[in-house]
Image (cartoon, rainbow, N blue to C red):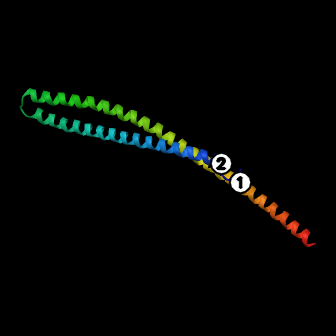
Amino acid sequence: MSRKTKPIWEILCLKNENEVKKIKLIFDQVRLKKDQALARKLKLETMLEEYGHKLQEVLKTPKTKHQSSVYRQFIVQVQKLLVFANNDVVKLTESFETVNRKLIEAKNEKLKLEKLAEKQAAKVVHREEKLNAKERDAINILKYNINH
């Protein structure tokens, strides 16, 4: 093997490293979206609870029916938004888990390729050491023959 050519395992390791980087980028994006969706859901839940308490306050005081009706309509709208937020969280959690599995698989593949590259490098070193030992033996035999 000439020293100018790259062993196939090194090329595969580089290719896999690029794949891991791409998946990691997607992983980070999905994680960010999932975290944002969870934050939106939490905000809506807090808002729902807050306006539920306000509605209870309005219902305790002798106010107009219109005001309590407005609070109820708002609470219904927040509940609808909460359903959409829950759906987003579920979908993004599934996407996150899928990308996470792909990332783990890519990292495992990377480790496998690195081990194969190390084995190949060890074989090359062993082969070179063997050739060097044969050359030294040949030189020593020539020196012995010349001296005797």
- Looking at the rendered image, the quarter that the C terminus falls into is bottom right
Residue at x 43% of width, y 38% of height: 96
Q: Position of residue 60 (x, y in %)?
A: 10, 34
Q: Nearer the viewer, residue 115 or 71?
A: 115
Q: Vertical placement of 63 versus 142: above or below?
A: above
Query: Could you say which quadrant of the image residue 35 lies in?
Result: top left
Percent from the top left, x then y, of residue 110?
A: 57, 46
Residue pictured at 91% horizontal, 68% vertical: 145
Observer able to see residue 88:
yes
Taking the spot 44% from the left edge, 40% from the top edge, the residue there is 26
Q: Which numbered dot is residue 76?
A: none
Q: Residue at x 75, y 55 (%)?
A: 127
Instruction: In this rendered view, identify the residue nearer to me: 110 or 79.
Output: 110
The quarter of the picture where residue 124 lies is bottom right
Residue at the bottom extreme of this rendering: 147
C-alpha separation, residue under disc 2 versus residue under disc 1: 10 Å
Question: Residue 52 at what x, y percent from top left?
Answer: 19, 35
Viewer-side residue, 88 vs 145: 145
In the picture, measured across the screen, residue 56 lies left or right of residue 7, that is left
Mark 2: which amino acid? Pro
Q: Is residue 64 left or right of residue 14?
A: left
Q: Is residue 128 above or below residue 34?
A: below
Which residue type carries mark 1?
Val
Instruction: Tell me if label 2 and label 1 are in contact, CB under 8 Å.
Output: yes
Considering the numbered disc 1 on the image, is that residue within a helix, a strand or a loop? helix
Name the residue carrying label 1. Answer: 124
Please give the residue where the numbered disc 2 appears in the rendered image.
7
Label 2, secondary structure: give it. Answer: loop
